[in-house]
Image (cartoon, grey):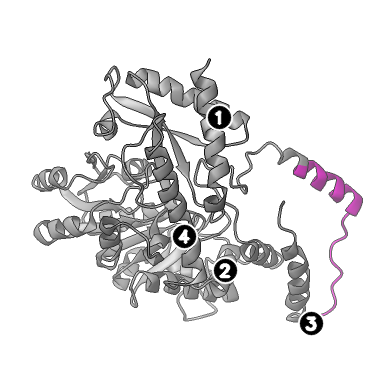
Amino acid sequence: MLEHDSLQMLSIALGTLEEGFNSLPALSPSRVDNARMAFVMKEVATRMHDNYPYFHPQYAGQMLKPPHPIARAAYALATWINPNNHSLDGGRASSKMEKESVADIAAMFGWKEHLGHLCAGGTMANLEALWVAGQLQPGKQVLASDQAHFTHTRISSVLGLPFAAVPSDNFGRMDVKALEKALERGESGCVVATLGTTGSGSVDPLPEILRLRDRFKFRLHVDAAYGGYFTLVGNLPPDARASFDLISEADSIVIDPHKHGLQPYGCGCVLFRDPSVGAIYKHDSPYTYFTSSELHLGEISLDCSRAGASAVALWATMRLLPLTRGGEFAAMLESCRDAAISFHRRLSQDTRWIVPFAPEMDILVWAPRGRSASEISSLSQRIFKAAAGHGLHLALIRLPLRFFSSAATIEPDQETLLCLRSVLMKPEHLHWLPRIYEILGRAADEVAHT
């Protein structure tokens, strides 16, 4: 069930890696007690049983998926050297691989000129983007949708920047009229547009937001941590496609290769359209930047020590699966999107469920029918638990009740609705949908009869 072939490839590659250091005097590796190691490794493997099966298509809950086999193998191979991409002294080869990989990601968004680097994940990447925004417009307010990731509120607090949430429309997208009213106060310096919210997968209307930027001259940051790679797919709905087609107009972009980019955690990426923002990072280091006049990645990042293995894994994956429209990697994403479309169609035709809106990417939200918001929330919780009992792992999300106003008449005894959510981010999900739907239906029927 778990992929093993890459272990043989890793062994061969390790021999090739060793050949590159044959000119060194002989060195005997530190002795280890193989029997004790084997015992501990078996214990580790056993402890890891206490996980949900994130690698399996019946895990359709949170945005978790296994890295590609080549990413796993390349990451592991790099740990024999354990490079640190803070400076070229610590990771010459891996730093070059990072620069090449980041350039390919920037090119995917239409940028030839850029500044960027990898980091621990979307939170750190967004922090750097908002930090730069705050340096350019000190004390100015950050605006993001009330459906944007909670990290923007937290980051703004850390940076000492005022933050305001902009109401969303009934499709989970930023309400442009509400944004306009907020901008008219003249307090805002940066707007965060989310292209793929982590809750419902909604895509903020970038064309309208850009028109407001022409008037109000704010800095535009695009949080595409989850959805960024969907710029490659050919089966997005028109509104989402229009937003992705204008992503190159942003001032900064964040994307997470450790989500749809098939990488191990943690691997995020922050990009800036104007390379001159690198001057904001300027600092002196008495010992790290002395072997090369080339750009050291530590000169343009807030992180110091950073895993070079992340860059090696990403470079290898993109070498195998280039970021091209119509390519093999894009086809994987299109399969995820097709799964969401098919799942939405099934749910919409089944009287047991209410579905607020069609998915824009591969994330779907829905709820069981009920008289009141509290009753539906209780049913969602029970179905979630029953489905897990049959090996189907979903997620729960609390959304504004108004999201469901066009789908059903619900007694509003509470303002939010606890509903079910699936992230269909494995290409295999399309093939497994019949089984997923059968288990979901069985769980719903069990709850209905108890």
Asked if residue 35 is among those painted magenta in the image, a careful observer would answer yes
Give the residue number, with chain letter if any, for mark 4: 333
Q: Disc 2 marks which amino acid?
A: Thr
Does residue 285 show up?
Answer: no
**Position in image of residue 66 (x %, y %):** 60, 53
Find residue 307 and report its horizontal and vertical position in percent: 58, 61
Residue at 43%, 74% in the rendered image? 103
Disc 3 to disc 1: CB gap under 8 Å: no
Q: Position of residue 165 (x, y in %)?
A: 24, 40
Q: Which residue is mark 1?
A: 442
Decide: is 223 above or below 271.
above
Hey, what amino acid is under mark 4? Leu
Question: Which numbered tag is attached to residue 42?
Answer: none
Q: CA distance from mark 1 to mark 4?
A: 29 Å
What amino acid is at disc 1? Arg
In the image, residue 5 sits, relative to residue 362, either above or below, namely: below
Which is nearer the N-term, disc 1 or disc 4?
4
Q: Nearer the viewer, mark 1 or mark 2?
A: 1
Of callouts 3 and 4, which one flags the residue occurring earlier in the amino acid sequence?
Answer: 3
Q: Which labelled disc corresponds to residue 317?
A: 2
Residue lying furthest bottom: 23
Label 4's element?
helix
**Sequence-earlier tag: 4 or 2:** 2
| Residue toward you, 164 or 176 | 176
Mark 4 vs mark 2, CA separation in Å = 15 Å
Judge left or right: residue 410 versus residue 376.
Answer: left
Q: Are marks 1 and 4 in contact (CB under 8 Å)?
A: no
Q: Secondary structure at mark 1?
A: helix
